[in-house]
Amino acid sequence: MKLMKISYVSIFVLLLGLPLGATTQAAGSDEPIVGRWSFPMDQAYVFKADGSFTGQPSLSGTWKRVRMDDKTSAIEYRLSYSGRRDKPEILTLSRGDREGHEYEAGHVLRLDQQMRVKKLPDKADDNFSDNTNSRSTETRRSHQSSEVEYDGQIGGSPAVFRLTTENEKVTGTYSQGDKTYRIVGRYEGARLLLDEYTGERLTAHIKLDPNGSGDSWKGTMYNVYPNKEQHHVTFSRVR
């Protein structure tokens, strides 16, 4: 009889474990975070059901649900970036108004600064910056301009920008003294929106408007790390 009881218990545990295991495995695909999201300055993030995510440029990491607020239905997720020692970010998704699309917006607490995020439709192409342009990939690649050098100032200190434009997308660097920073951005109408990267870390946003006639720009740099300082920016094309 003793052996028979152990057998019944074992069978019960196995039967109970099957649906529980299946539910746990499928839970990731039901999470509102799973899918494609646009972060500030049109950075692309793709969150997968296996608890991983990728982003631009060359970002990757893992996500995990932290908690849910039953009163507001807001869900918090912890984002941990691969190869980084700084503290994880918290992404909070809030419910929308449309039935069947409850979680369409939210914000990410990045270095103590809240920034908005937006849900995007699922597509095969994960290059969000290129998706804003209706022309084909081959057309974009066939109209790449050469590097252009600009002289200017950031916060009153001399700076040299070297930028390459491929249709609406801008890449390049700028240098101040012995330091060089990577630039990624785009044109949005008449405005020029740039992101500054120190290594793989996003460290500043730069928003610029045309400065009179010719290829000249003025605007503001908004630091996001390690402080939130703002600096006036101007630069003009070297003739």
Image: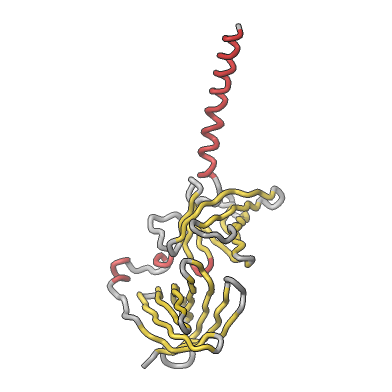
For the question of whether residue 36 can be seen, the reply is no
Q: Which residue does the image show at 60% across and 80% down from the upper left? A: 230
Q: Which residue does the image show at 40% across and 89% down from the upper left? A: 237
Q: Which residue does the image show at 52% across and 88% down from the upper left? A: 157
Q: Which part of the image, by quadrant, shows the C terminus?
A: bottom left
Looking at the picture, tell me which residue is in the foreground, 60 or 101: 60
Residue 76, x across and y down, in percent: 62, 53
Q: Which part of the image, by quadrant, shows the N terminus?
A: top right
Q: Is 134 on the left or on the right of 155, as rendered?
A: left
Q: Is 207 on the left or on the right of 141, as rendered?
A: right
Residue 130, x across and y down, in percent: 39, 67
Which of the 4 image quadrants contains residue 151? bottom left
Residue that lies at the very extreme toward the top in this rendered image: 1
Residue 12, x across and y down, in percent: 57, 20
Residue 199, x across and y down, in percent: 46, 69
Looking at the picture, tell me which residue is in the foreground, 73 or 159: 159
For the question of whether residue 26 can be seen, the reply is yes
Q: Is residue 194 above or below residue 95?
A: below
Q: Is residue 39 above or below residue 12?
A: below
Which of the 4 image quadrants contains residue 222? bottom right
Q: Is 75 on the left or on the right of 193, as rendered?
A: right
Looking at the picture, tell me which residue is in the foreground, 11 or 226: 226
Residue that lies at the very extreme toward the right in this rendered image: 71
Q: Looking at the image, how many numbered discs can be counted on the residues? A: 0
Q: Which residue does the image show at 54% across and 44% down from the upper left? A: 30
Which of the 4 image quadrants contains residue 124? bottom left
